[in-house]
Image: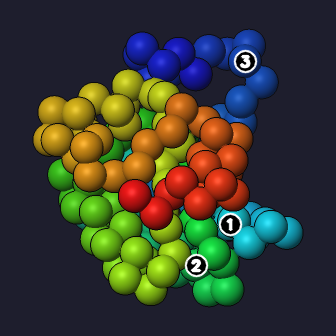
Amino acid sequence: MDPDRGERSAGDGARPAPEPGTVEVAVRPGDDGVAVVAVAGDIDAAAAPSVRGGVERAAAGARAVVLDLEEVELLASAGMTLLLELTEDLRGRGVPVLLAARARTVRRPLRITGLDRVLTLHDDVASARAAAGDGAAHG
């Protein structure tokens, strides 16, 4: 994926993008208590229940949740609201949420709205997992 354009190139080995207007959510529990929820496609009002369900499943028994948003094609206002709600809900339960994305399709709307100062952002899943392991996600 080209982080500046939010597009996949044909030769990058990535799986095909979901159809426009759809979302795919994959939950990967971690042996270290840090669960990863990979989201691909569009995070909008229609996708909110699927994303919320995936994060809730991941949070059950996890000490932290990393949202892998690198394959997100569209982050609509409803998606940003969802990210904020999930972060606040889980933080209240003692489960930090860290976002992993360097793609412009995610970073730009978060920056424009100021949510990049409220949500915990990392460039990739590895750095988010490392921060969760260090306890740095509680800020």
Which circle's residue, 1 or 3, is located before the other in the chain?
A: 3
The CA distance from mark 1 to mark 3 is 26 Å
Q: What amino acid type is highlighted by mark number 2?
A: Ala
User: CB atoms at circles 2 and 3 under 8 Å apart?
Assistant: no
Question: Which x, y percent locates residue 79?
Answer: 29, 56
Q: Eyeballing the image, is 105 above or below 98?
A: above
Closer to us: 28 or 11: 28
Q: Label 2 crowding class (10 Å Cα cut-off): few <14, some 14-19, many 20+?
A: many
Residue at (72, 18) in percent of width and height: 12
The CA distance from mark 2 to mark 3 is 31 Å
Q: Which mark is residue 12?
A: 3
Question: Which x, y percent locates residue 91?
Answer: 40, 75
Q: Eyeballing the image, is 106 above or below 6?
A: below
Q: Eyeballing the image, is 42 above or below 111?
A: below
Q: Which mark is residue 35?
A: 1
User: CB atoms at circles 1 and 2 under 8 Å apart?
Assistant: yes
**What count of labels does the image hold?**
3
* Residue under pointer 2: 59
The CA distance from mark 1 to mark 2 is 7 Å
Q: Label 1 crowding class (10 Å Cα cut-off): few <14, some 14-19, many 20+?
A: many
Residue at (31, 72) in percent of width and height: 88
Which circle's residue, 2 or 3, is located before the other in the chain?
A: 3
Q: State which mark lies toward you, 1 or 3.
A: 1
Instruction: Classify residue 108 as left or right of residue 60.
Output: left
Q: Secondary structure at mark 2?
A: helix
Q: Secondary structure at mark 3?
A: loop
Q: Quadrant of the N terminus?
A: top right
Question: Which x, y percent locates residue 59?
Answer: 58, 78
Q: What amino acid type is highlighted by mark number 3?
A: Asp
